[in-house]
Image (cartoon, rainbow, N blue to C red):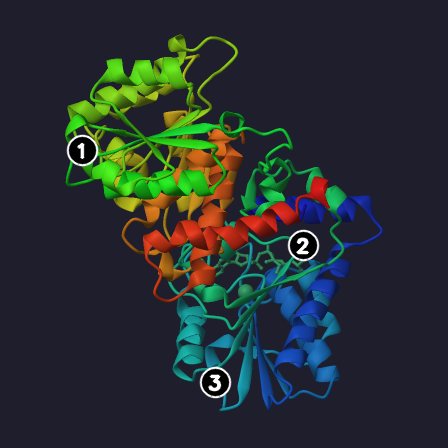
Amino acid sequence: MSNELLSPAEMSEADRLTIAAGPTDGIGLMRRAGEAVAAEVLKRYPAATHVHVLCGPGNNGGDGYVVARILAGSGVVTTIWASGTPRPESDAALAAALCPLKPRPLSGFDAGAGSIVVDALYGAGLSKPLSGDAAKAVDTATALHLPVVAVDLPSGVSGAGGEIMGRAFRAEVTVTFARKKPGHLLLPGRGQCGEIVLADIGIGDGIIAQLTVSTFENGPDLWLQEFPVPAVDAHKYKRGHVGVFSGGPSATGAARLSALAAARSGAGAVTVLSPANAMQVNAAHLTSVMLRKADDSVDIDAFIGERRPSAFVLGPGFGVGERTRKFALALLTSGHLRDTSTRIDGLVFDADAITSFREAPDVMFEASRQPNAPALVMTPHDGEFARLFPDIAGDETLSKLAKARAAAARANAIVVYKGADTVIAAPNGRAAINANGAPWLATAGSGDVLSGIVAGLLAQGMAPFHAACAAVWIHAEAGRRFGPGLIAEDLPMAMVPVLRELVENQPDLR
Ligand SMILES: NC(=O)C1=CN([C@@H]2O[C@H](COP(=O)(O)OP(=O)(O)OC[C@H]3O[C@@H](n4cnc5c(N)ncnc54)[C@H](O)[C@@H]3O)[C@@H](O)[C@H]2O)[C@@H](O)CC1
Ligand SMILES: [K+]
C-alpha cells in the first residue's frame, strides 16, 4: 500500500530505519532525493535560463546542494542562495562540500525573468514561522512570478498539519519522498504545493510497514477489498435496509436525497420515515423508496422490530431540538430491540442531529459508548463541528487532522469532518484525508447525499470507518467528474459510473 501519509517524525524514523538496514546511508538518500528534484526541473523547464536554488541549514538544504550540483553539471546556469551553513559533519554539510558552486547569502536573493526557483529552505524540520531572509525570499519569488519547485514541502508549510507558518512558497511542483505527508493534502498547505510528485528514494515498503502508520490518503486502496458486491443469491433485504428520517411537510427534500443516495450506493431497500403530517408530500415524490410513518420512539421501535433495518440517517432537514435528541437517543439505545441474529450496523448523524446536541453533547457521547450501541458516523461541516466540539474546534495548536481525531475519540464515533479537505477519523486514531473533491460539490443538499451513501454502505456490512471513507471518496469522485452545473439531485446518478469502476476493479472479481 502506498497511501500512507507520514508525519515528519514518521518520515525521519523511516530514514533512520533505512539507513540502519543498509546499504543506503544518509547521503545516499539525500543524493536520490536531489536527483529526483533535478530530474523534474530539467524535464519541466527545459527552456529555463537560470535556476536559483535556495538552501536552508538542514537536510532540506542538503537536497538543494545536490540539485544545484546536478543542474550545474548539466549546463544550466545555477546560483545557490544559502541561509546559514549546514551543521559540520552532517549529510547536508557533505552535500554542500561536494557541490562546486559557491553559495551566496540568501539576504541578497534576486532573479531575472525566465528564472526558476528551487525551494530547499525547510522541509520536515520546519520548526517556527518563516521570517527574515526566508520570508523576504518568498515575497521576491511571488512578486517576480517565478515558478517554484519545492523540495519535499513548500517552505513555510507544516508537513504535519498543512498550516502556513508565517509565509510559504506557492510551488508549481512539489517533489516529495517515499510517501506524501498530511500537509500535502490538508488546506491551506495543499494549495501551496501545486502538482505533487512522489519520488522513490529507496525507502522500501517493508520499512514503512514497521512504522504502524495510522494516517492515509483516502482512496479505493484503503477500502476496495471490502466494497460490497451483491452475492449471486442476493435478495433485497440481504443487501441491507436503510431508514432515513424526514423532516416536516416543508422540509422533506433532504431526507429523500439521502434516501436516494442510500439506494444508489447499493442498499437493497430504503424507507423514508416521515412525520404523519408529511406523509402526503413524501408519498408524492417516492417510487422505489418506501414510506412509513414515524412520529415517536414507539413508531421507531415498531419499524426496527418488524422490518429489521440495518442503518439509519438522522438529521437532514429534520429540525433542531428536543424531538431530534429523543430520536437520536432512541436509535443509539435500540440495541435491546434486536435479537442476536440481526443488528443495526450503523447510524449516520448529520446536520440537525448534530446541532441538536450543542447544549449537551456528552449525552450523545455517553449513549454511543454503551456496549450495545450501533456504530455511529457523524458528518459535521465546520459550523456543526464547532457546535459539538467547541474546545477542540477553537484549539489553534491542532490541525484539522488532529481535531477530527480528538473528536472521534471523545464521541466514540467515526467523525467525517467535511470541507474541501475532508478528514475521516475513527476513535482508535485511524484517519484518512480526502483529496479527490472539487468545488462543484459545495452545493445545497450535497451533504444529505453523502450521509445517504454512508448509510447505504453501512447497511451492506462495510466496517464504519471504511464505509465513511468510501462514501466520501465516491461522493467527491462523482461530483468532480460531473463538474459544472452540478446540483445535489445529480449526484446519485453521477455515482453510477464511479460505482461501476469500483466493482469492476474489485480484486476478487478480476
Ligand atoms: N536522511 C534524511 O533525513 C533525509 C532527509 N531528507 C530531507 O531532509 C529534510 C528534513 O531535514 P531536517 O530534519 O534537517 O529539517 P529541515 O532541513 O527542514 O530544517 C531543519 C533546520 O532548519 C531550522 N529551521 C526550521 N524552521 C526554521 C525557520 N522557520 N526559520 C529558521 N530556521 C528554521 C532548524 O533549526 C534546522 O536547523 C526533508 O524535508 C527532506 O527534504 C532527504 O534528503 C531524504 C533523506
Ligand atoms: K522546501
Task: Out of 413 and 295, give the one closest to the viewer.
Answer: 295
Between discs 2 and 3, the one toward the N terminus: 3
Q: How far apart are marks 2 and 1 (CA)?
A: 55 Å
Give the residue at mark 3. 110
Mark 1, Cα crowd under 10 Å, few <14 / some 14-19 / many 20+, is some
For the N terminus, the quadrant is top right
Any mark on residue 278, and which? Answer: 1
Any mark on residue 136, and which? Answer: none
Mark 3, Cα crowd under 10 Å, few <14 / some 14-19 / many 20+, is few
430 versus 339 height, above or below: below
445 versus 317 height, above or below: below
Give the residue at mark 2. 178
Residue 98, image quadrant: bottom right
Q: In this view, does 18 lie to the left or right of 223?
A: right
Task: Out of 33 and 53, give the one closest to the viewer.
Answer: 33
Q: How far apart are marks 1 and 3 (CA)?
A: 68 Å
Between discs 2 and 1, the one toward the N terminus: 2
